[in-house]
Amino acid sequence: MKRSKILNNKSNLVYNIVAYSSIILFSVFCLLPFWLMVAGAFTDESAIIQNGYQLIPKKFSLDAFDTIFAGNRVLNAYKVTVLVTIMGTTLAMILTSMMAYGLSLKTIKYRNQISFYVVFTMLFSGGLVPWYILITQYLKLQDTIWVLFVPYLINPWYMFLLRKFFTTIPESLIESAKIDGANDFYIFVKIALPLSLPALATIGLFYSLFFWNDWWLGLLFVNDRRLQPLQLLLRALVSNLSSEVQALNPNSKQGIIPPAYSVRMATSIITIGPIVLFYPFVQKYFVKGLTVGAVKG
Amino acid sequence: MSKVLCETGHSGKKVRLRKNGILHELLKNKTIYLMMLPGILFFFIFAYIPMVGVIMAFKDYNIKKGIFGSSWNGLDNFKFFFSSGDAFRITFNTVYMNLLFLIFSTVISVALAIFLNGVTKKVFKKVTQSVMFLPYFVSWAIVGIITQGFFASENGAINSFLKSINMEPVSWNSSPELWPFILVIFYLWKWCGYNVVIYLATITGFDTECFEAAAIDGASKFQQIRYITIPLLMPTIIILTLLQIGKIFYGDFGMFYSIIGDNGILYATTDVIDTYVYRALRLMSDFGMASAVGLYQSLMCFVMVFGSNLLVRKYQSDAALF
Amino acid sequence: MFKKLICLLLAGIMFVSIFTACGSKTNDSTTTNSTNESSDEAKSGSEKSGSEELAPYAISAFLPGDTPLHLDEVLEEANKKLKDALNVTLSINFASWTDFPNKAQVMIAAGDETDLIFDAPWMHLPQMISAGAYLDLEQLLNEHAPDLLKAFPKLMIDANRQNGKIMGIPLGDVLSSYHGLWIRGDLREKYGMPPIETIEQYEQYLMKVKENEAGMIPLTWLGNYCIGPNGFYDAGYDVVLFGGNNAEVDIFATADEVEEIVPIYENPHVLEWINMVRKWYLAGLIEKDQMTQKDETGAFKSGKVASIKGDYIVGTIQNQIESIIPGAKVEFISFEGKNDKHVTNFAQWNFICVNANAKDPVRVVKFLNWMYEDQANYDLLRYGIKDVHWVDAGDKMYDLPQGIDASKNYNFPGYTLMWNPNFERTLATSSEDDKFYYKKLRDENMLVPSMLTGFTPDLEPVKNEIAKVSAIWPSTMLPILNGSVDISELPKAQKKLEDAGYLKIVEEAKKQVSEFLANKK
């Protein structure tokens, strides 16, 4: 008995060492790329060309940020992206939650058919060209702020995640409210939504991340420079600085070549920044929302 | 949580003594249907109307004639794709890469979740969990930039390091055999934190009595994990795995395209269906073939999603997607 | 239940398809109508006499690259002029190089009406032309663009016809490209060598580097291609690579003859090169891992390599290398006599095309003409507002105004919209060598048209063979061409290429060239 306890203590010590060291190692592994980004962004371009990217900058420089913020394009793109993220997330949340709520109710006879109607769209799509024709020629949405979020307003995955959460609302609660004379919309707003805050926060974060990180809609449907979202602008900045493109670009013979390597890192920083800062505010809901939606434990 | 489950789980089977008419149902729940209407319309407009374009897969697409005016060419687009030898390669790559992702990320996330669960210091737990979640926010475009930062042959951080300790630098960009693993590493980096959150929450929900009893009986921590935690966690693991398998024919385009880009040397191991379709369009301007490959992928996905959903439903009916 | 649903869905889809089919048809007919009407109007308008009577029209262009800084200021200025001249306004949209080809394709496939679109033979010009995406400009140019036709040497237009038609305006700041190498002038001087003019001298330079600079690689180039036709075996010839880079048949032409077309492994020029490059490789003059080289310029800039393939314009690379290696000097060398006439086919790489769906092609062509009506028009779009973004330095040169940071200045990618050898200016601070080559390559008298001028390979008949050969080329022929594998392996490579159908490509090349030459007479 005693011996096994000592043995156990020893093995528990081993366990603790393994557990803590793997957690710490993995955390460092997660942070390393962020560190490389910061270090690269603040390193002088010639130092990168000579020594490559290094985790400790040898020659400090702010040139990269200078290049990015030349002109007011980045600031303007920031505005567009913030607007799109706010409008898109709000509208998406409204549409998604209304649909998810309806599909979660067992009293709705056609919920399975409608679910299938949605699932089908996750599997089959008409492809890029018909979609493009629809949006530009029939809906005439190109070069409007709407085109940057309307085509993505309901994400089926998130919708089903939310539906899952709604199904955990006790049916008795809804029924008793009905007996009290509340209509369905009232129940949805006053009972279902408040009970689902964790899931709403989670999906809200997903949507905002989605709109924040999107450049595809901007690329396809926006020609007006004032409507360019941040990610598209930065994508352009980065891709046009790549060495293959420089080689292709006869202009670089006469013009100047901006710092390419450090700019890449600097652009990364300014795009990730805000969304990372946003995370702590929803973190407390996050774990709960994610878990219930994904798998009911 | 499990209480909630019990209450909702079996109440849907009330016998309704009403007429079966569509109109009747619509009228009865008109508020709910009205609430769903915007969503239904959304999918109709943005998903179903463009689906007409699927016919491009069977046409010799001509820009001037448009989708409807182009002439039919039967299954030629499919024939070209399957006879070029690419079909097998990219299908294999897609499935193989997704399996690698699935296996590695499940093992590592489960391990980390179990380890984190044993951590008693709250601050440490919170900080490390947040740090692990951080990469989830980073878009693939930026992951691509970071990849180059580490692996570029000339000035990547790894080669710079190797040179500084007088070792031979590795020419990453011309070694296709290395990239599946590099991709796995970045996949882990981006997704593990997310999976850890799910598994950890499941573990925290377990009854602590079992563990206490086991500890009194003299079971070591390793034994507790082996005989209690993992068996209890199994249902969650299986469900998550099945859901992933449903998506096995989707190569994450953002990931592969941002990291691999147009580096043809690496296609041998890293070209997946989605990137192939993209290039078919871009390099060959072959709209018909791109459509055909897309349709092929959709069909494979359809089978997989339905199959896995069927299994999920058998296993744990309310975790099923539909 | 599902069956019913699927039936319903299918019915829905059919309904939709009928609906959209009708929709698109009616839409198509209206657009074609309006196109006809508007171009008729425009025609009648221009016939009547004045630009004043033209209805306002917005011209849009879609180009690759990054939006130039200050573009809006410049466009505002240009639009004032354009309004007076043609009653048009110009807007230009850019997409990054990575995204441009794809977006351009989707736009064209979807029937977008953007007037001017950049394209190039290395992008998807041939495919787009055969899909009917662009207008044939022959007649439009003859009727409405006299200044443009004056600005472009006839040879440049004619040499860049696609299947005999003018499918785009060829854009180039010089009339011909020019191949050669970059070396480190400071090292050459250190070894007390005269300027390099022959391959023998160049070999000596490489040897000296090998002897004197520990850790420095004498010569390297990108892994996926052969540096041979870069002055080594093509000096004095116009070499057309039929079949593209990885399935090539090298066709050697001079001003008065086209040499017999043979497979690459029988070509005397190429065989001579293979022997030389193998010798160099064994002597350690070439990077051991040359086949995996991805960034030759980076390696050159950081001083790891003493010579790479180089552009005839050294330009800004000089400043960059100096900021990293003080005292370093980049020199362009070529094995053709510097003052000899250069044999060329006048092919250009970049084109601006008129969309077949453009609403008013006449006005679009008139706009193109406007750019060359007056040097001031060209300068405005190309260099920006005079004395704000650039100053006239006389003698067809320009300079930056004092105190202007080049990285924050207006810098339009001219090669995507207007480049022209007669209107393009040279940067006043360019080196003497750079100025010399600009001048030489813009001077028709210094250039000799090769027999193959105007010849555009049509690869469609051998598409499959090219795909198959390209797949094995990098592992069979390329290592031999680059010296990393011995010439004794050549028969094996030859066998593999022939199995893949390489001889068919050779036959096609012969056929097309002989047809071309027959038509020429």
Image: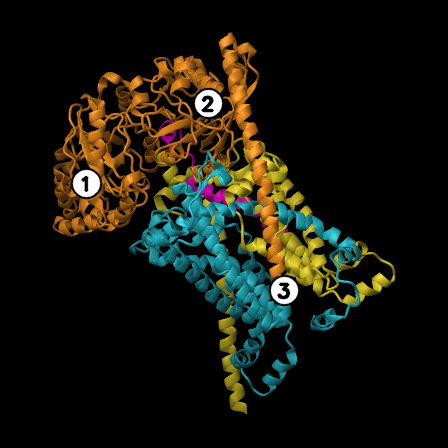
Chain colours: A yellow, B cyan, C orange
For the record, the magenta segment spans A249-278
Chain letter of mark 1 equals: C
The vertical placement of C205 against C54, above or below, is below
Are the residues flagged by discs 3 and 2 from a single subunit? no
**Is residue A263 located in the magenta-colored stretch of the structure?**
yes
State how far apart marks 1 and 3 are (Cα).
64 Å
Q: Amino acid at mark 2?
A: Gly
CA neighbours of label 1 inside 10 A, class few (<14), some (14 to 19), many (20+): many
Callout 2: helix, strand or loop?
loop
Q: Nearer the viewer, mark 3 or mark 2?
A: 3
Check disc 3 and report the residue beneath it: A291
Q: Quadrant of residue B113?
A: bottom right
Query: In the rendering, at what x and y percent does residue C440 appear?
Result: 26, 20
Whether residue A234 sits left or right of residue C222 in the image: it is: right
Q: Amino acid at mark 1?
A: Val
**Foreground: C32 or C51?**
C32
State how far apart marks 3 and 2 are (Cα).
59 Å
Chain letter of mark 3 equals: A
Quadrant where the C terminus of chain A sits is bottom right
Check disc 1 and report the residue beneath it: C209
Q: Does the image show residue B105?
A: yes
Check disc 2 and report the residue beneath it: C403
Are the residues flagged by discs 1 and 3 from a single subunit? no
Callout 1: helix, strand or loop?
helix
The vertical placement of A250 against A183, above or below, is above
Residue at the image point whose x is 38% and y is 52% from the top: B79
Residue at the image point whose x is 22% and y is 23% from the top: C520
Query: In the rendering, at what x and y percent does residue A229 appear?
Result: 57, 39
Q: Amino acid at mark 3?
A: Thr
Most common SS among magenta residues: helix
**Foreground: C66 or A40?**
C66
Q: Does the image show residue B116?
A: no
